[in-house]
Each structure stands twice: as C-alpha cells, then as structure tokens.
Image (spheres, rainbow, N blue to C red):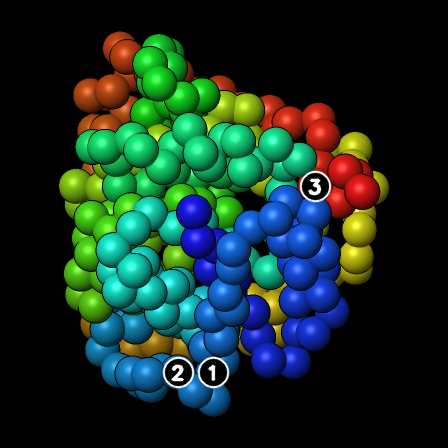
C-alpha cells in the first residue's frame, strides 16, 4: 500500500522522523507538500472557508487543503493509500495490518489513531480485520487509510464546506468509516499520555495562527455560525441515538510496540 506523507517544506526534522519509520517498516511512500497559509487556494477570504460551525484559523484551512491534495492523489492512484501527517508514530506491525486492510471492500476510510478521547464504535468487529465500524470521531486526522471512493466523498464535502480536517472526515455524508482496534498510531504530542518515549520534539503548527473570535464578526455572521453549530450538535445527537444499540463509546487503546522501537 502506498503511503502519502503530508509535510511542510520547512519541517525537515519531521520528515527525517517519518523517513526513519518508512525505512524500518519498508513502506513505499511519497511526500505531499503541505499547503501553508501563503499558498492556500482558494484564499482565506473565499466563502468555502466560512461555512463551518465556527471561524477557522488560516492554519486549519491550510491543513484541510493539504489533506485535499492527499485525497486527490488517492483518486489518481485509484487504490487505497495510507495517509499520514508528519508527526504520526506508527505501530511496529503496521505493514501486516495494512495487508489485511488492502483487499477489503465496502469501506471508504479507516482511522488508525487514538487520541485520549472516546469514540463511538461498533460492538462487533469486522470479520476479516481488526477494525470496527466508526460512527463518531472528531479527534485527529494524522493517520488513516483512504479508499478512492472515500477520497471522492471527502473532496466533494471539502469543496462545499472547508473545515478542520478531522471534523470534516467525521461529518462527511455517506462516508463508511472504520477504526483500527487496537489503534496503530498516535501523534507525537500524545506520547506522554500513553507512556511512550517521544522520538522527536513536536509542537502544534495549527496553533501558530490566532484563533478567530466570533465577537469580532457582524451579528449576522455570528448568528449563522451559531446556527450551524447547533445543527451539527443535533446531527451528532441523532447519530448517537440511531447507532447506540449496535455501538458504544470506548477509548481505543494503542498498540504496545512502535516502529521506531523496532530498530
């Protein structure tokens, strides 16, 4: 399975960390140049970036656009791909797990990561792989497998409503998502939470931009954001009611062995 790594030009330390993992795992990979605020297209004032439930940081817009570039590449390759942000720590047995996922059908997206929050997942695992149907998750977009069908759905949604990449995935209409169980990845900023030695220092690139304030917007725009927020919460509530009989909120624990420990 091809691996696509989203990486900013200046983040050479992160790329070196990912290259190390790729070497250990023996994965075929390519770099997806991350979009930055200066190269964002459409630009930050375009209407598409102002249809989410709250105002977005320009760095959130750029990360969404970076994932769109990766999803576009999945469509071009016409095959499921592993998509990683450049601070994803990967499981030592990831390749074997990917081999089990590759032939599966009827799936659009598999989240590989966990992030110290519960997810709404199926009680019953998939019969052919250690994954469970994922019904609600808004915590992270650093490690996933995306099929061409899922990439097309995600691109359609992103072109309609620009959003934080993880929220866009979890709210994408019709996206058939699964969760790896156990989780096969954590982001580096979660190492302490999971008792893992952090291989390299990291800091949030999203937080490099100030968070926009609703108070600075005209009353009509504040009302529109709040209405979308309320609607989004109602949709999540309905989803919980519909799928609760076959699912449960559970913290997905990660694996115990990591690629960088396999050397």
Number of other residues with Cα within 10 Å of mark 1, as a class: few under 14, some 14 to 19, many 20 or more: some
Please say if the residues under marks 2 and 1 sit with CB atoms less than 8 Å apart.
yes
Residue drawn at 44 percent across, 53 percent down: 2
> What number is the disc on residue 37?
1
What is the spatial separation of the Cα atoms under label 3 and label 1, in whole angstroms?
32 Å
Percent from the top left, x then y, of residue 42? 29, 83
Does 203 sit above or below residue 45?
A: above
Percent from the top left, x then y, of residue 193? 73, 36
What is the spatial separation of the Cα atoms under label 3 and label 2, in whole angstroms?
33 Å
Which circle's residue, 3 or 2, is located before the other in the chain?
A: 2
Residue drawn at 33 percent across, 47 percent down: 80
> What number is the disc on residue 128?
none
> What number is the disc on residue 259?
3
Viewer-side label of 3, 1 = 3
**Front residue of 237 and 92:** 92
Instruction: Left or right? Give the position of 202 relative to 62.
Output: right
Instruction: Left or right? Give the position of 1 relative to 206.
Output: left
Percent from the top left, x then y, of residue 211? 51, 69
Query: Could you tell me which secondary element the residue under label 1 belongs to?
Result: helix
The residue pinned by badge 2 equals 40
User: Considering the image in quadrants, where does the C terminus appear?
Assistant: top right
């Amino acid at each position: 399975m091809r691996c696509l790594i989203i990486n900013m030009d200046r983040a050479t330390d992160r790329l070196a960390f990912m290259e190390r993992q790729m070497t250990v795992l023996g994965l075929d990979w390519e770099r997806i140049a991350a979009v930055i605020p200066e190269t964002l297209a459409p630009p930050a004032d375009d209407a598409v970036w102002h249809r989410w439930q709250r105002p977005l940081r320009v760095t959130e817009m750029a990360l969404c656009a970076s994932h769109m570039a990766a999803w576009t590449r999945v469509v071009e390759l016409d095959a499921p791909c592993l998509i990683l942000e450049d601070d994803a720590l990967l499981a030592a047995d990831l390749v074997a797990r990917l081999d089990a996922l590759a032939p599966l059908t009827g799936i659009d997206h598999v989240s590989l990561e966990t992030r110290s929050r519960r997810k709404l997942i199926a009680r019953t695992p998939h019969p052919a792989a250690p994954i469970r149907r994922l019904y609600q998750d808004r915590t992270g977009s650093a490690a996933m497998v995306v099929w061409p069908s899922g990439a097309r759905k995600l691109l359609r949604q992103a072109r309609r409503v620009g959003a934080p990449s993880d929220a866009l995935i979890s709210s994408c209409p019709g996206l058939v998502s699964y969760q790896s169980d156990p989780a096969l990845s954590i982001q580096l900023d979660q190492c302490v939470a999971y008792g893992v030695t952090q291989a390299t220092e990291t800091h949030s690139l999203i937080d490099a931009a100030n968070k926009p304030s609703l108070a600075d917007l005209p009353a009509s725009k504040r009302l529109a954001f709040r209405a979308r927020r309320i609607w989004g919460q109602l949709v999540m509530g309905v989803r919980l009611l519909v799928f609760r009989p076959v699912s449960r909120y559970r913290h997905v624990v990660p694996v115990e062995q990591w690629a960088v420990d396999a050397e």
